[in-house]
Image: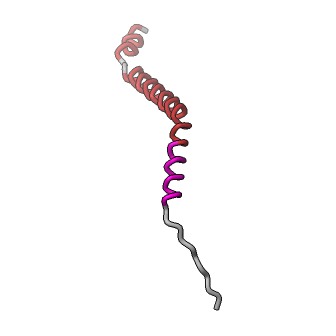
Amino acid sequence: MFKLIRNLNKNQAGATAIEYGLIAALVSVAAIAAMTALGGSLTDMFDSISGTLDSSAPTTTTTTTTP
């Protein structure tokens, strides 16, 4: 029984993997929160840029000829 407890005490690989998993989860939650918070303003910015580009693009007319 004491041998089992000593082996569990020496084995730290599982604890390290869990810590890395928790850090990855925390980073993911922070990234999702940041993207959600900035989502609306980024959409507005890209809509503004798109509107500016559309209004400054040269207009072309296409004509079709029938044989």
Q: Residue furthest left?
A: 10
**Relative to 47, 27 lies left or right:** left
- Between 61 and 9, the one lying in front of the other is 61
Q: Nearer the viewer, residue 37 or 66?
A: 66
Q: Is residue 55 magenta?
A: yes
Q: Residue furthest right?
A: 66
Residue 35 horizontal side relative to residue 64, left or right = left
In the image shown, does 13 or 22 lie closer to the viewer? 22
Q: Is residue 46 left or right of residue 2?
A: right
Q: Position of residue 24 (x, y in %)?
A: 44, 29
Q: Position of residue 18 (x, y in %)?
A: 44, 23
Query: Which residue corresponds to the image point at 50% horizontal and 43% vertical from the top-left?
Result: 45
Q: Residue 22 in the image: state x and y as whole percent.
A: 46, 24
Residue 54, above or below 58 = above
Q: Which of 45/5 is in front?
A: 45
Residue positioned 58% across, 76% down in the render = 62
Identify whether 56 is placed above or below 5. below
* Residue found 51% across the figure and 34% down from its top: 38
Read off the magenta span.
Answer: 45-56
Q: Quadrant of the C terminus?
A: bottom right
Number of marks in picture: 0
Q: Residue furthest top?
A: 2
Magenta region, main secondary structure: helix
> In this figure, which colouring scheme has been used for the structure?
secondary structure
- Give the quadrant of the N terminus: top left
